[in-house]
Structure formats: structure tokens, C-alpha cells
Amino acid sequence: MTKPTKAKQTPRSFGLVIKHNVPKATQLALEVTTWLEARQCKVFVADEAKEFCKLRADIPAIPKEELPAKCDMAIVFGGDGTFLSLARLMIWKTIPVIGVNLGQLGFLTEIKIDEVYDTLEEVLMGNYRLQERSMLEACVKRDDKELFCLPVLNDVVITKSAIARVIDFDLALNDVQVARLKADGLIVSTPTGSTAYSLAAGGPIVHPQVNGTVITAICPHSLNVRPIVIPDDAMITVKLLQKDGDIMLTLDGQFGYELHQGDVISVTKYARHKLQIVQSPKRDYFELLRTKLKLGIRGGENA
């Protein structure tokens, strides 16, 4: 397990990612922009934030995937989904990300609205801590031809899209067969993603600093199939043996691809870099578990 590291860089340029069609997110981003400009910081915004761009046409608007190359740090105004939309685009370069949650506290966007300026003050003084999160890379091969490879922060999911029949697939680890499984699907998740779909399917909670990967079958057609935690440097291979209906591969709940019989999906540790998240000094991971999942909280008790 790796410990959070103290930041070394004092950022002077920030890239903003703003949740769609949420006036509160736009308004807060406008206020933060003014605050940063008053401290001689450069601000960029992802060009998908149309309302912000109309109100501040003087702020450079660029494609979201270009923010890591232009900025020292990113600020996400939204929820975990908005955060994921940026994280999975940081393919060639990673920058630290501040996640500002506009509603219920998130696992990734853990900075509350009333903590934004205190957090930014600490950031501009270089007095902040980063937590690194491991990522995965999912590749699909068809007829021995690689179709694509993409990074994943939360999970790789193979599941049915419509017909209620089980999927038949072969699971291997480092080219050694683990099992032939029949199930509604399969989830391969990072520790960060262990509290998402994998948890709902019966998988374990894994601390985000553990160097592991979780494999969880969805409704397996067997009583003896259990979730498995493996080293994160192992290669997971899934071969789709039978295709009865539409089978989808979904990455982080945001990218979908229809699979064919015989397709081979490989999942490995993303080797280029880890994601860097600016930590809130006011809470830890277990507080998030207590708040969001009511860990250890009995009925009638408050978190």
C-alpha cells in the first residue's frame, strides 16, 4: 500500500470541467475563475461548457482531452461521473485533479462547495497532498486484430444489453485458465471502482491504495463462484465463447462497444501513469464509506 504524497508543484494554470446543464456548477466555476484570476492564475475551460463560454468568452475554451497538456491542474465541478469523463481522457499525460461535489459527497469529487477556496488557498501555497489511483487498460482483439486499447479508472464491464440469457466466457490470468464461467456478466475493477458496480454485484471493498484488481462475476450460474482479488500487474484475459443476443463492453460506464463471439478482452495495469487526486484535508476514505455507504452505521444512527 502506498501513502499519499505531498505535492511538489505550485500550479499556476487551471483547467475547468463543468457538469452539463447544471447552473450551480456554472456559477461556481465563474466565481472560482474570478478568484484565480485575482491571484494571477491562468484559466482554461473544456469547450463543452457552453453556458460558461457564453458568459466568459475571454477564457480559452479547448477540447477536454487537451486540458492535461495545457494546464498544471484540473478542477471538476460536478459528480463522480463528470470526474471520470476527464480521468479516462488523460491518456498521454496526467495532472492533479480537484473534484468539487455539488450535491451528495462523492468518492472522487470529495471537496464540498464550502471547502473550495480553502482548498485552493492551500494548493497555491503548495501545501496540499495528492493521492495516486491506479488505472487499468482494456484492449479488444477480434480475429487476432487489436481494435482498441483505452484507460479505465473504475471498471471494465461485460454484460448483456437486452436478452435475459447467461454469457458463456473463458477467464484466464497471465495466460493460465482460471475458469469457464456462465453468468450475466463480468466486472474487472480497480480499487477505486470496487465501491461501484462491483460492490453492488457482491464484490469486496478494496482500499484505493491497495495494489490489486477485483474480478466479480455478475449473477453467476453457479454456487461456487466468488469475487477474486489479484495483483494489479497480472494480465486478465476474457474470451467470449458464445453470443446469444447483444453483449456489451462498457468502460467506466461511459464508453460502450458491442462484442462478437470469439472476441478477446485483455485487461492490464495502465503503465503510463496513475491518476492524481487532490485530497481533502478534512476527511479520509473511511469517512467517505461511513457517509456514502453507511459502513458500520446501524438503523437510526447518524454517520
Image (cartoon, rainbow, N blue to C red):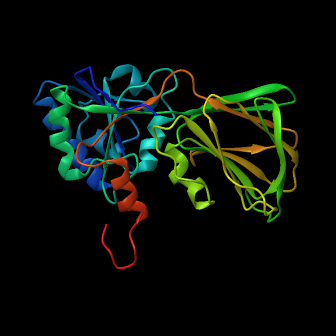
Quarter in which the C terminus is drawn? bottom left
Extreme-left residue of the structure: 38
- Residue shown at 20%/39% (left/top)? 119
Q: Nearer the viewer, residue 47 or 117?
A: 117
Q: Nearer the viewer, residue 294 or 71?
A: 294
User: Would you identify the image quadrant in which residue 38 lies?
Assistant: top left
Residue 91 appears left or right of 290: right
Is residue 93 in sight in this rendering?
yes
Query: Looking at the image, is 206 positioned above or below residue 6?
Result: below
Task: Give coordinates of residue 274: x percent, y percent.
Answer: 47, 28
- Residue shown at 19%/25% (left/top)? 126
Residue 8 appears left or right of 246: left
- Residue shown at 23%/32% (left/top)? 128
Query: Looking at the image, is 157 positioned above or below residue 143?
Result: below
User: Would you identify the image quadrant in which residue 163 lies?
Assistant: bottom right
User: Would you identify the image quadrant in which residue 41 lies?
Assistant: top left
